[in-house]
Image: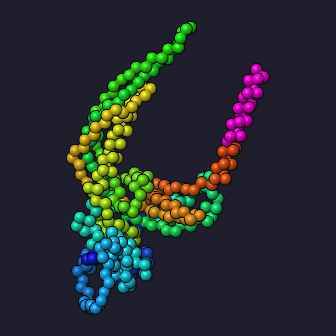
């Protein structure tokens, strides 16, 4: 597989530069020198023209990765170690020297993103987010906090497709209004039936759809929204120090999910206008999109995995806003304890009410 590894070295000390989420620039972790992204990019382009020594060796019998393996092998320019990773990996770190590397070949041509939202929150913020997520959960097993271990905390630039479109819609509803009254002989109920029709158009910008098979769509949608006003034109420098994957679900495959999200949002918006009725039931929904545009973007996500009693729990945090989501186990003993207390309290209140009524 023909690919190129891109590393950003500090002009001052030669250390490996990483993207600094706080300063929104490139920072050397060794000498603390900071550089703006554009300068680092220009310097890297200039250095890319430098030629290296060329030695050619051929092994008489050599096993190679096949395309069916879905794996690729690269050589780290810093230490020479082999980096074995999935062929969709766009950025990672060397397992031997820990230096961040970017696989430029997986970010070129049609694979090059249009936009990127840089990380604003670092790994410590992700760990603090997990602590806040665990705090105050009365039904969470106490030992979960003690025995729980964060197996992995990964900052990932996740591949997303962004859909922009105008939507024309027409929805028909069956609605009712009900009136009750009575006289000395009968109780009356009057139900009026209405055909409601809502018609109009909406504009959608940056509807995100996960472009990776490995990431759970529900989990990714749960940490939305992102502020796309902070999105910038893609530069590989933003990936340094983080992981990144290229998409393995293309834009055409992502269209059904985008259509579903746009249709659901349109229906919710129109439903919000049907007020003042006892019941409102949609009968027919029609949505047509026009002037559609699709862009490819990388969005910041912190992923954490933990294990407890042999079960894996996955948490995700929006690397821009800090929104945190993830499922937690429930202490069955604590659940039944709280249920018993609640039921006892309700029973006591009911007995007290009956006693007061008896006294009256």
**Quarter containing the N terminus:** bottom left
Query: Residue 215: horizontal and vertical position, in percent?
Result: 40, 60
What residue appears at the point 35 percent right and 66 percent down from the top-left corner? Answer: 245
Q: Is residue 219 above or below residue 17?
A: above
Location of residue 93 with respect to 355 vertically, above or below: below
Q: Is residue 255 above or below residue 275?
A: below
Answer yes or no: is residue 8 visible: no
Q: Residue furthest right?
A: 359
Residue at coordinates 41% horizontally, 58% vertically from top-left? 216
Residue 306 placed where, x, y %? Answer: 53, 64
- Along the viewing direction, whichever of 129 and 344 lies nearer the viewer: 344
Magenta highlight range: 342-360
Q: Is residue 221 visible?
A: yes
Quarter of the rendering containing residue 79: bottom left
Q: Is residue 359 magenta?
A: yes
From the viewer's perspective, tell me whether residue 144 is left or right of residue 205: right
């Amino acid at each position: 597989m023909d690919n190129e590894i891109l590393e950003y070295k500090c002009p001052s000390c030669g250390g490996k530069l990483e993207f600094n989420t706080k300063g929104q620039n490139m920072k050397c972790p060794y000498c603390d020198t900071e550089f703006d992204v554009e300068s680092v990019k220009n310097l890297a382009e200039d250095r890319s023209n430098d030629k290296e020594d060329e030695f050619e060796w051929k092994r008489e019998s050599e096993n190679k990765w096949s395309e069916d393996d879905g794996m690729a092998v690269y050589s780290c320019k810093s230490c020479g170690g082999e980096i074995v990773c999935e062929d969709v990996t766009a950025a990672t770190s060397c397992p031997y020297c820990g230096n961040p590397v970017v696989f430029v070949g997986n970010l070129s041509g049609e694979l090059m993103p249009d936009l990127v939202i840089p990380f604003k929150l670092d790994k410590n913020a992700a760990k603090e987010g997990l602590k806040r997520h665990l705090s105050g959960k009365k039904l969470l097993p106490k030992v979960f906090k003690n025995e729980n271990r964060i197996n992995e905390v990964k900052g990932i630039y996740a591949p997303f497709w962004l859909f922009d479109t105008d939507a024309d819609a027409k929805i028909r509803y069956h609605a009712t209004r009900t009136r009750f009254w009575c006289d000395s002989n009968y109780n009356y109920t009057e139900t009026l039936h209405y055909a409601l029709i809502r018609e109009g158009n909406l504009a959608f910008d940056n509807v995100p759809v996960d472009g990776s098979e490995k990431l759970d769509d529900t989990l990714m949608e749960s940490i939305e929204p992102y502020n796309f006003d902070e999105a910038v034109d893609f530069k590989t420098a933003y990936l340094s120090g983080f992981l990144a994957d290229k998409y393995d679900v293309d834009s055409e495959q992502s269209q059904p999910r985008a259509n579903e999200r746009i249709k659901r949002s349109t229906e919710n918006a129109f439903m919000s206008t049907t007020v003042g009725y006892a019941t409102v039931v949609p009968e027919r929904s029609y949505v047509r999109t026009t002037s559609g545009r699709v862009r490819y973007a990388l969005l910041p996500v912190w992923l954490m995995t933990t294990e407890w009693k042999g079960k894996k729990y996955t948490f995700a945090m929006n690397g821009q806003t800090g929104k945190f989501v993830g499922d937690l186990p429930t202490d069955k003993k604590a659940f039944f304890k709280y249920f018993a207390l609640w039921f006892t309290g309700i029973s006591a209140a009911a007995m007290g009410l009956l006693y007061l009524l008896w006294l009256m």
